[in-house]
Image (spheres, rainbow, N blue to C red):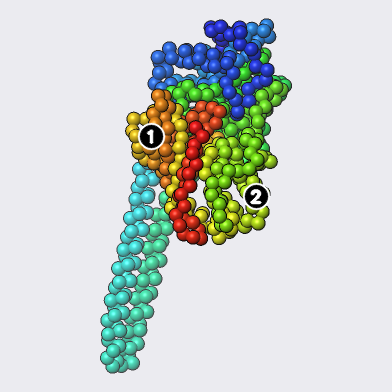
């Protein structure tokens, strides 16, 4: 077997093989995958020539396999390129290698690059520069001449109006009229002459622009055709021996076309190589190595699920024929709760203590939610009930209104940020400062929902104040005071390296999975929508 198949250097004989293959979107790494990842990380730590790129961060994957003779081993892969190449020792090759200099992709890429150079040459050519300069000068000169003529007409008109205030003979009055008509006609003649001059200069520029625009359109057409050709070269296999290209796999998605980089992630590379070499896939895991990117949250050495935007349509096909683990759907994980614990209630509002794992509002499944329970308890209530929401995995105070008017009032308070909120969380790590403010704008990750990205360009303002309550040696209890209410705000602000750099314990999206997400809404203060008194509610964290 070539060097892409690695036998374990650590003892694994006593580790039971997995009964089903990993669900790449919801998994706990199998012990064999952990050992394979550690051995891959040992290899990475010795690659000095890659040190700078590895420090910047990259996703890697391992696939535990068994060959036709029954030998156990693993494959390793990286997402995208490594050190400017799609192939490297130790790692499986890409699904389709379009980096070879003689490859059609590279040849056509060079042709398109030459077109870019020609477009830039035409745009910076002296003849084009001179034509645009003459157009600008002609336009400015025309504006100036016409403006001067109109000002002269206004001055002459004012003089004529002044003369008309005195008695005039019939011939004098007619002369004034002829003077006015002549000046108006002169302005019209000047406007036509200036317009003709500008149009002539514009035609010269247009003639050059037509050539440039034709080249732009040809470049666009060839770029799209090349990308289309490339997607067709990615013939993805599955365990049933079926092959489909990226066009087929993404035809039923919302966009209908593959995103850039589809098929180049670690997971598809691993499965493709295993199928080609008749290796039986047993378990898979992906981990991040290096610093976190600026936009998203990635932790060095942490395991991550496959991304949904690029990989879900591909892996849905590639996993066909394998017996997959069947994790429970997220919305069926809610605890069995007979009735919610009421923290406060009167004729207008009610506050409950939401348990971790329960939805705030109904989702796609039939899982219970706070909204449904409140509907059963208060069937006569009007309006949408819940005045705000908590993530399914977050526990704590949730406020609802029994009347439409009370609901509108409470929502206005949340909108205008007059509601006092405090959360308590257990963080994985430590920070030197005892208190501070995190200001990181957030937006959804279009390729991996429901994850959120930090983006100065596309994000909405998200501000969180924090205070360290207790340092526990490796973890710490922190109070969060959110000033805005963005999706996953506290989770991203805690985990992101530009925030606290310490994910909330149990955060499977931005940190590491645990028995629960250690985040609790412990305090809520608001103005009663009817009595106008200030209400303060508290719920002690269960951790």
- Which residue is at the front of the view, 276 or 149? 276
Residue 135 visible in the displayed image: yes
Question: Alpha-carbon distance for marks 1 and 2?
Answer: 38 Å
Q: Taking 99 as reference, is 141 above or below it?
A: below
- Which residue is at the front of the view, 315 or 334? 334
Question: Callout 1: 10 Å neighbours few (<14), some, many (20+)?
Answer: many
Residue 521, horizontal then vertical, whole percent:
49, 41
Secondary structure state at the residue bearing disc 2: helix
Residue 194, horizontal then vertical, whole percent:
37, 63
Q: Say the numbered circle drawn on residue 468.
A: 1
Secondary structure state at the residue bearing disc 1: strand
Residue 308, horizontal then vertical, whole percent:
58, 33
Mark 1 or mark 2: whose residue is earlier in sequence: 2
Tell me the mark number nearer the camera, choosing from 1 and 2. 2
Q: Taking 170 as reference, is 96 above or below it?
A: above
Residue 243 visible in the displayed image: no
> Is residue 517 toward the left or the right of residue 368 in the image?
left
Q: Say the numbered circle drawn on residue 377.
A: 2
Residue shown at 37%/30% (left/top)? Answer: 431
Q: Taking 4 as reference, is 393 above or below it?
A: below
Residue shown at 39%/34% (left/top)? Answer: 469
- Which residue is at the front of the view, 89 or 410? 410
Question: Callout 2: 10 Å neighbours few (<14), some, many (20+)?
Answer: few
Residue shown at 62%/57% (left/top)? Answer: 382
> Is residue 10 toward the left or the right of residue 140 in the image?
right
Q: Quadrant of the N terminus?
A: top right
């Amino acid at each position: 077997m070539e060097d892409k198949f690695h036998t374990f250097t650590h003892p694994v004989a006593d580790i039971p093989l997995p009964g089903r293959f990993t669900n790449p979107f919801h998994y706990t790494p199998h012990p064999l995958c952990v050992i394979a990842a550690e051995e891959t990380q040992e290899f990475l730590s010795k690659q000095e020539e890659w040190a700078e790129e590895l420090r910047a961060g990259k996703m890697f994957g391992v696939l535990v396999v068994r060959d036709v003779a029954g030998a156990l081993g693993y494959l390793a892969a990286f997402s995208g390129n490594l050190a400017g190449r799609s192939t490297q020792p130790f790692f499986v090759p890409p699904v389709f290698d379009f980096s070879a200099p003689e490859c059609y992709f590279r040849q056509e890429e060079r042709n398109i690059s030459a077109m870019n150079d020609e477009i830039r040459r035409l745009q910076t050519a002296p003849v084009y520069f001179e034509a645009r300069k003459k157009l600008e000068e002609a336009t400015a000169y025309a504006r100036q001449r016409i403006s001067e003529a109109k000002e002269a007409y206004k001055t002459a008109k004012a003089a004529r109006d002044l003369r008309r205030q005195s008695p005039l003979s019939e011939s004098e009055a007619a002369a004034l009229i002829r003077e006015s008509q002549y000046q108006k006609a002169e302005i019209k003649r000047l406007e036509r002459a200036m317009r003709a001059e500008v149009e002539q200069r514009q035609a010269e520029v247009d003639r050059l622009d037509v050539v440039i625009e034709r080249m732009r359109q040809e470049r666009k057409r060839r770029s799209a055709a090349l990308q289309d050709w490339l997607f067709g070269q990615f013939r993805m296999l599955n365990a049933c021996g079926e092959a489909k290209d990226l066009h087929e796999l993404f035809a039923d998605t919302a966009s209908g076309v593959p995103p850039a980089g589809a098929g180049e992630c670690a997971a598809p590379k691993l499965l493709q190589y295993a199928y080609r070499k008749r290796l039986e896939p047993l378990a898979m895991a992906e981990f991040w190595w290096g610093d976190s990117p600026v936009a998203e949250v990635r932790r060095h050495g942490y395991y991550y699920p496959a991304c949904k935007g690029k990989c879900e349509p591909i892996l849905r096909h590639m996993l066909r024929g394998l017996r997959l683990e069947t994790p429970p759907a997220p919305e069926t994980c809610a605890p069995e709760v007979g009735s919610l614990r009421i923290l406060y209630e009167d004729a207008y509002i009610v506050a409950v203590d939401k348990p971790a794992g329960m939805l705030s509002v109904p989702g796609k499944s039939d899982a219970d939610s706070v909204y449904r329970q409140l509907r059963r308890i208060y069937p006569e209530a009007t309006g949408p009930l819940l005045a705000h929401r908590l993530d399914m995995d977050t526990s704590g105070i949730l406020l609802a209104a029994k009347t439409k008017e009370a609901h509108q009032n409470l929502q206005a308070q949340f909108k205008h940020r007059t509601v006092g909120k405090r959360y308590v969380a257990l963080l994985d790590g430590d920070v030197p400062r005892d208190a501070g403010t995190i200001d990181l704008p957030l937006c959804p990750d279009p390729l991996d929902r429901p994850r959120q990205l930090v983006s100065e360009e596309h994000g909405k303002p998200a501000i969180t104040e924090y205070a360290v309550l207790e340092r526990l040696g490796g973890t710490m209890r922190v109070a969060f005071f959110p000033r805005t209410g963005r999706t996953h705000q506290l989770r991203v602000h805690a985990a992101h390296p530009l925030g606290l750099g310490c994910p909330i314990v149990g955060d499977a999206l931005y940190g590491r999975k645990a028995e629960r997400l250690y985040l609790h809404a412990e305090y809520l203060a608001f103005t009663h929508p009817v009595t106008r008194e200030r209400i303060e509610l508290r719920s002690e964290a269960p951790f």
